[in-house]
Amino acid sequence: MASPPTTHLLYLHGFRSSPQSTKARTLAAHMAAHHPQVHWWCPQLPPSPRAAMDMLLKGISQWPRQTMAAVGSSLGGFYATGVAEHTGCRAVLVNPAVDPARDLAKYIGEQTSWHDPEERFFFQPEYVDELRALACGPLAHPERYLAFIAKGDEVLDWREMHGRYASSPQVLLEGGDHALSDFDTHLPRFLGFLGVA
């Protein structure tokens, strides 16, 4: 049975990223132009993973579980997985982080934003523990995830992503990069999964 069309869409950016990322702006513009009836939320996530997840769960607390969906890139994919496991909603993941507690441990200290180098934040040691605490076990409904995984990802290991979402539908790209620079070409598959193509 086909899932009902998405009515509420959450977009979650990656580490050091923002709602100004190319993917976020591309998807926001597409939704505004072609699906203005869909409620769109793309928040700036705080550096603290616990604060980020608390903010997200509070923000979507009134959303309809059957027709909401989450989209996440990199660290945002890790958060989107947490949201989907909590709500049972569908999720589209772009090169999702699998073990950010391990990967981000080396980034403790002052960081700058990709889209505004003037904007700085401090990645605290306790954030690594918060990421560890947020890690989900096996996916309850792997069929509700669609993962876009680029073998050319220069930041994360595609094999790890492929293994984590092995039971989920995947688009395994031979080349590509971590940012999925040709994101717009994948929108039809992306939106088809969400029922808003």
Image: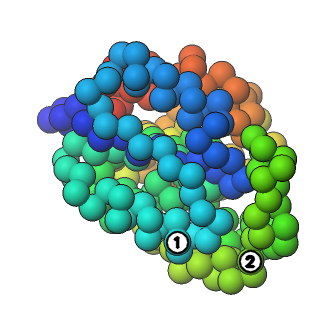
- Residue sitting at 83 percent across and 50 percent down? 118
Closer to the chain start, of discs 2 and 1, is 1
Query: Label 1's element?
Result: helix
Quadrant in which the N terminus is drawn:
top left
Which amino acid type corresponds to the residue marked 1 in the rendered image?
Answer: Ala
**Residue at the image point whose x is 32% and y is 56% from the top:** 60
Q: Residue reaching furthest left? A: 1
Whether residue 91 appears in this view of the structure is: no
Kindly tell me whether residue 183 is visible in this rendering.
yes
Is residue 83 placed above or below 36 in the rendered structure? below
Residue 76, disc:
none
Q: Quadrant of residue 124?
A: bottom right
Numbered label tally: 2
Residue at image point 34% right, 44% down: 69
Question: Which residue is the site of mark 2?
Answer: 124
| Label 2 element class | loop
The residue that disc 1 covers is 51
Q: Where does residue 89 sit, x and y in percent of width and height?
A: 30, 51
Residue 37 percent location from the top left of the image: 26, 27
The residue at the point 84 percent across, 47 percent down is 117
Q: Nearer the viewer, residue 74 or 110?
A: 110
Within 10 Å of disc 1 (Cα), the crowding (few <14, some 14-19, many 20+) is few
Residue 163 image position (x, y, % from top left): 57, 54
The disc labelled 2 sits on which kind of residue? Gln
- Side of 114 where 37 appears, left or right: left
Extreme residue in the front direction: 118
